[in-house]
Image (tube, rainbow, N blue to C red):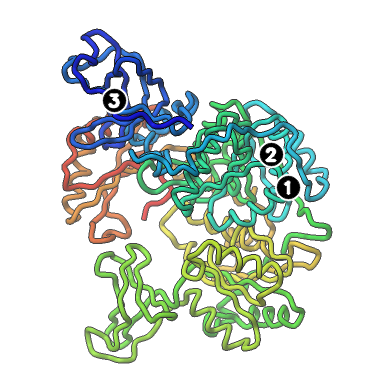
Amino acid sequence: MKRLPTALSTNPKSLPDEGNFCIRVGLDVPLPKLFEYSLPAGVDARIGDRVTVRFGAQQKIGVVIEARVAPELPAERIKPITALRDDAPRLPEDWIALMRFLSAYYQRPLGETVIGALPPRLRSTKPLPRKVSLKHDKSPAPGARFVRGHSLLPDQKEVVARVGVGFNAYLLHGVTGSGKTEVYLHLVAKALERGMQALILVPEISLTPQLEARFREAFPDAHLALMHSALEDVARTGAWLAAARGEAGIVLGTRLAVLAPMPKLALIVVDEEHDASFKQQEGLRYSARDAAVYRAKLAGCPVVLGTATPSLETWHNSTLGRYERLELPERASPGARLPAVKTVDVREDPPAQGFCKALLLEIERRLANREQSLIFINRRGYAPVLACEACGWTAGCERCTARMVLHSTDRRLRCHHCGAEGPVPRACPTCGNVDLKAMGRGTQRVEETLAARFPGARIVRIDRDSARRRAELARTLEGIRRGEGDILVGTQLLAKGHDFPALTLVGVLNADSALVSTDYRAPERLFAVLAQVSGRAGRRERPGEVLIQTRYPRHPLFVALEKHDFAGFAQAQLAERKSAGFPPYVFEAALRAEATRLEVALEFLRNAAASVHPPDEVQVFDPVPHLLTRRADFERAQLVMQSSSRPALQEFLGLLTEKLFAAAPRAIRWHLDVDPIEFD
């Protein structure tokens, strides 16, 4: 192993004469520019090298973006680099190209984008720990042993055969339980046979243990690198280095894994491509799904977007022929069929403590047959509202325009937006009434109700409160697969990617709230989550059933679910989007601002809109407060921009961000979200 060089000479004699060459370095600073540095004699830094440089009074890690370029600054103002780092592979050209694309498209400084894509240890000026800095000089061995799970069905064989070697984007539209993972395994095997690398992206950390086990079992000889934000820094850095050195044949991870250098990349798979978790919501607000498509184009390899419920943007691209659509219309397990989806009209069967009689009877029948039931409610905690019926007081967050959620396990009130918490008051702070009521239901209250109704049943609750540790969640899920649990209560953590052989009933509570949302994406998301959670039922020979409690049993969305008709639902939604002027028929961006006073944020947005005259193709709407106006003591507002022309919108955004980086007041926190998916 090479040792890191010590600090290089800063003797002025080592500075280049005017007209000589310098390098330009990207740094993690909120400025849209590169910084010029010189190279001391005998030092050769190239594009993609990491360097230590002095920036003001600090030493910072930078990445060389341009090398051997004529300086723009006078020679006396150009400082030499402090050190050339050789503790990690040089970042390859295609990776730098990906960073340039992300920086330009999402309107963030290139240096911030490049440094932010590195694991935390590689952003630090401190030496790497020895156990992650050792170079193993390994690469995926051609012909890696592939232990197949089972023979491919005809539809699966056709899909594997149609995925080629060069760049193409594929939409793998397979119903829940159709064996998409088995297709992934065979595609990865083809890449490993050539001594190449495969990248597998999943939306949630909770999905990685099961998928990781499948891949390790299928490829016992392959080096698999796991990458997600919950890993400790050393483990995450080790996985990144294994990917960058070409040692890891398989890289499995969440959205951040798409940013890892992979010199022998031959396949990208984006599982559950529709999932909102693939969109980063802070810093560089990139879509990992879209970045994966662009990265596959740079690498000249196929990218497979797999899901049972494609995003409308992806479905639209497939109808236009931009993506090649591959279908898996049947479940893979022998005798398995899609579950029967039914609605329960709560007007005719009024719920008692949240449950209609029809749903309780079906749960009881499953208990008698030793089958599992899943109760889905996408709301954690005990109750979303603590209220006083005497005066109308409700427990609200002092830092947000949101209500505090009651958690029964430790008798605390918590805000799910800013994390604030406090004790449950003994009496109403307004009128003194001691009879405070818990209004509505969360997973904890549903668990309590079921425990009282079925005292002998083993009830397992899985949400972000009960599954804080990844190892505990993995053990719990494995126990459920072994049958250690009769009734499961959960949120979206249980809605996708899990295979529970004994589960035959899914009950859905509180599905109607999304039907009256102001968010135009709400129906798409509701259909996706209900189709995904429904897909947990009946994945073996025993038939599955889904009961959805609703006031609107004949709503077109529920009718499409009953028929398992995603294509019809998507066609209707796209027609509505087109008539209303929403994506994918227009392109959007949102400029968002936060300040201690709402008027300050709104004034900033008004001034920003007036600073650049939009072309005719770009429409700039008036700034408005967020639905959740105050969060964590900051007042929030946003300015939405739309255009039918992506290039026109991008050109306008480039001019706008140039103005903002140059003149935005420090009292304002602002960011630009290109292709936003959330407006709350």
Residue type indicated by callout 1: Ala
Q: Do the residues bearing badges 2 and 1 touch, measured as CB atoms within 8 Å? A: yes
Given residues 396 and 313, the one toward you in this image is: 396
Q: Which residue is mark 3?
A: 8
Q: Which residue is mark 1?
A: 218
Report x, y in % for residue 464: 48, 66
Residue type indicated by callout 2: Val
Residue type indicated by callout 3: Leu
Residue 116: quadrant of the picture: top left
425 sits left or right of 196 in the view: left
Identify the residue shown where x is 55% and y is 45%: 312
Report x, y in % for residue 568: 64, 50
Please name which of the two marks, 2 or 3, marks the residue nearer to the observer.
Answer: 3
Q: Mark 1: give few (<14), some (14-19) or many (20+) Cα within 10 Å.
A: some
Give the structural element (helix, strand or loop) at label 2: helix
Please name which of the two marks, 1 or 3, marks the residue nearer to the observer.
Answer: 3
Please name which of the two marks, 2 or 1, marks the residue nearer to the observer.
Answer: 1
Residue 672: quadrant of the picture: top left
602 sits left or right of 443 in the view: left
Q: Which residue is mark 2?
A: 188
First in residue order: circle 1 vs circle 3? 3
